[in-house]
Structure formats: C-alpha cells, structure tokens
Amino acid sequence: MKYATTLTAFFFLSLMMAQEAISFRYLVPLPVTKHVSTRNWSYRLELLPEEKGAYALTVTQNDVRGERLDRDELTMASGSLFVWDSPVDAVNNRVRSLEITASVPMRGLLWMWNESHGQLNAVTVLAPIANSLVVPYLPDAGALSTSFTLQGRSDAVTDSHIVFDYFNTDRIAGAATVVRQDLPEFGHLTLTPGSNLLLGSIEQGDQAAWGRISASDEGFLISGFQTITDEAVFGNPDFSQTSALEMVPSGRSDGWVTFAAGPLVPDHRALFRDRFVLTNDLPNSVSVAFDLHTLVDVIDEASGETTTTVAIHREQIDLLPFQQLTPVLGEDLFNEYPGAPIRLHFSATQVLEETVAAAPIHVLRFQEGRDLPMAGSHFFSSAGNEMRAWLVLNSPFSSRLDITSLSQILTLPPQEEGDEPIVIHETSQIQVQLFDAERLLFSQNFTLGPGTVNSLFTTKRIADLMAEKFPEETIELVRVHVSVIDGRPITGTLVSEWENDIALVNPRIFTRTLVEPLPEDGAVK
C-alpha cells in the first residue's frame, strides 16, 4: 500500500511539474456563417505534437462571454494525436471556443462540417496569436458573403475594445469603428458585414474590400478564422457552399499552389475553377510575378512523335497601395494557357528607398467546382526540403497529400559551335516515411520530375497498405514525413473530400539546413 501511495504521489507531482512547464497556448474560436444556418455544424479539433516524448495538455471549453464550461487536464503518450469532437450542435449548446495549453509545440487542424448542407471546411490552428489580424477578403459579389470569428486572451487585462478599420474597392480608408466594447478574455465575437457589422463612414454604395480587426489594448491578443459563403451556387439558392481561412497578422512575399495531375484529376480546368484574391495592405505599390508550370505535348516535326514537357508561363500584376484584385486562372490570369497546370508560384516585391525588396501581401486561392457545388480555400503554401502531415484513417473525410518538386527543365547553350543545346531535367529524390505514434510503418524513395505531382498518399491507399502489412492491428493515425534526399525543394497541399465538398489546407513545410538520412528505427525527429 505504501508503495502504491508513493507511485500515486510521484504521478501527481510529475503532472504538476509538467503543467508548470506549459508554455504553448492555442486559441480556437468555433467559426460560424451568416446565410447558412449555424445549426447542425459539427467541429473536430486534431492536435499533434511536434516534439517526441509524453506531453501535458489542458483543454478548456468557453461560452460566448469567455466563461468556462468545462476543463480537462490530460497526459498524452509520445506522438499521440489529441482529438476533440464537439457536442452535438456545439454552437447552439453554448460552446463557442477552446483554449489549449500544451507542454510542447503542437500542429492542429480544425474541421467544420454541416450534414444538412453537405459542407466541409478545414483550417490550420496556428500560433502565436496577435494583437491585430487582417481580414483579407470582404466579398460583395451578389451571393457571396463572409463572417469572421475571433477569441481574445491576455495576461495583462481582463478585457479590451475591439476595433475594425477597412479600405474600400477604391482604396479609400474607412473610419476605425469600435465593434465590441470590453470583449472579455476568452470571449467569442462573430462579425458579418451587412448584418451586425455596419460600415457607415464611407458613402453608401461603396464596398469594403478588406479590413483589419484589432484589440485596442496592446496586451490583448486575438485569434480568428473567416468563412466565405456562396449563397446561390450556379445561381441556385438551394445550393450553398462555404470555405474557411485563418486570419493572420501579416502576409508573405511568395508561395506555391499545387494542382493534382494524372488519373485522379485528368483535366483540372474541366473540374475546377481557381480564383485568387490579392490584397496589398502595404502603403507602397507592389509588383506580383506569377509563374505557371504546365504539362504540354510537343510534336517533333521530323519524326511526328509526341513528347510531354513542362512549359513555364509568366505574367505580372501590379497592385497599388491598399488595393485588392481578384483574378481568375484562365480568364484574367494566364488567359487560355496551354497544357495541364502543375504548380503556380507568386513572388511580390516593392521598391523601398530605390531598392527592390520583398513585399509581404495576402494571396488567397479559392478552388470551386464547375459542375458540383464544392468550394475550398487556403493560402499559398511554403516550399522546403521537409514536409509533415498526418492522415486519420478512420476519419469521415477522405484525404490525399499532393506533393510536387520545384525542379525544372533547363536548356543550357552549346559548349562549342555546332553542338546541340544541353537539356537538363532536374529531379528531386524524396523519401516518404509513414509512422503511427513513433513506430516506422513504411519507407520508400520516389523521384519527382519537373512535371510530377505525387498524389499516391491517400487515406484509402494507406488504410489498405496498413491492413496488408499489419493484419492483426487497427492503425488509425498515420504521420507522413517527406524528406528531400537530393535535388530541389518540394511543396504541396492536403486535399480532403466529404459528400460533394472539398477542403484545402497546407501541410507543414520547412527547410532543414542540414539534411541527414532519417533513422530506420522509427524514431521521430
């Protein structure tokens, strides 16, 4: 008995020490929409540690006033996935937000779906939170509307005024407006332009293009998400679709979009419409260069044989200070481009004191179905030599990871007169490893050429592989680790499907300064 008591005391002492060491905090307000009923929305939060070892986790559920409804303190095994599923009809049952504190950094996905409307949204849960967030898109295109949702947190003050300011489509600033007085800590706030957010400082008829929402107290930090709703897809009010985005404090100066290719999506343009929202929240003009990589068939005039190659097309869009533009791929941007799209890159620059410098702006991508009422959205992805994602095999959503290399086809001039030009096909050698919590389940090397998009890693394919390799086990979570062994960096997108809808989110992509062979013993770095 004394031995058991000692163990129990040691366990609680260890848990208390772990709680004292907690230094990572995540705020997760539950997004809602205006024109699609807030009823029947379900939410699922998935959090995965970015470091190995057991970790402590505290999950607090709050109501709209920031008052605690429930709190759980957990000790999680190394590499294990934490999942929070909302109560039935969570928003109408008072749960408005979550506060997560953890002893290790986490990577998270928040899923949001509506069975009544067959809709699926997903956003990444990011840290740190900030005092001010950009609302990069305030649509006014007939049936399009938006709502944005936030939650506050502070160690210094108990509440703060929330201020909204914006620019209209003519780049004219509207007056800053206090949209909520004394939002309490952990309080939940949802704003919808044209409904509970009335912008009256600009002449009636002018449309707000983008805005910024801030806490008046510097020590009060906020986190938030935005939903975009198309109330009448194909002009039919019976078809509604939504997509969701993270609200971030600042933009970025470059990024990538990956298009699936091959048997899964034989003709991207026939199935999807891609439109982009470019928002310049800087006081300077910005030049945005776009490079579109496409697969094209080339016929040799002498032999008549057809070969497939990668063509690169470049266009430039100039943004004035505080301007927003919304080009559509194949219409306003790369009109009638040849071939099937593989990837798209943007790079934004500005001139500061006669020197060209990077220009962090906000560039969103919306992918919409041409024949089905589906919609997904995300920010452009990063590129690097490491990629991390996870797939939940028993999830109600089917997902796949699209991976592509930044490799190109290079043509070098002949070394001597009379010689042929030298054509180099760059490649990336990647290693894909699958883990559960920490055990290595699968490892294989792949070669990505200039026109390759690897879409093999899907929840169905991996579930079938796990059932074949481990017939006596039930494996529910697979962590996907992709590493560049040799060659150019990689980028990619995580695509999920449910009912007729899709959701797009970015996997974690980063660069290690020194890439070493990954261990074969299954240890997670």
Image (spheres, rainbow, N blue to C red):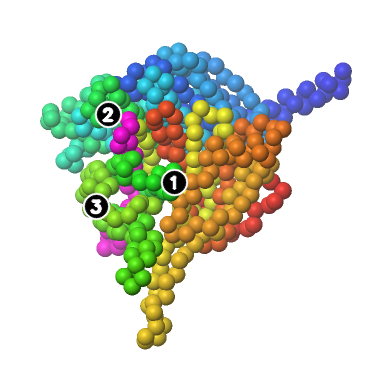
- Contact check, label 3 and label 2, Cβ < 8 Å: no
The reply, left or right, for residue 360 in relation to residue 457 is left
Image coordinates of residue 401 in percent, x first then y, are 49, 43
Residue 434 visible, this orientation: yes
Secondary structure category for the residue under label 3: loop
Q: Residue at x 52, y 40 (%)?
A: 458
Magenta residues: mostly which secondary structure? strand
Dot 1 lies on which element?
loop
Question: In the rendered image, which quarter contains the N terminus?
Answer: top right
**What's the residue type where badge 3 is placed?**
Glu
Left or right, 280 with reference to 452: left
Q: Which residue is mark 3?
A: 336
Q: Are marks 2 and 1 in contact (CB under 8 Å)?
A: no
User: Which residue range is magenta in the image?
Assistant: 347-373
Give amino acid for label 1.
Answer: Pro
Task: Say what amino acid the circle numbered 2 marks.
Answer: Val
Mark 1 vs 3: CB contact within 8 A: no
Using the image, tell me which numbered label, if any, was put on residue 233.
2
**C-alpha gap between disc 2 and disc 1:** 27 Å
Q: Is residue 24 visible?
A: no
Question: Residue beneath label 1, please?
Answer: 263
How would you rate the neighbour count of disc 3 (Cα within 10 Å): few for under 14, some for 14-19, many for 20 or more?
A: few
Residue drawn 29% across the image and 55% down it: 338
Location of residue 20 by image quarter:
top right
Q: What residue is at 64 percent from the left and 42 percent from the top?
A: 435
**Percent x, y for residue 40?**
41, 17
How crowded pointer 2 is (Cα within 10 Å; few <14, some 14-19, many 20+) is rated as many
Q: Residue at x 30, y 61 (%)?
A: 356
**Is residue 360 covered in magenta?**
yes
Residue 342 spot, x, y in % from top left: 39, 52
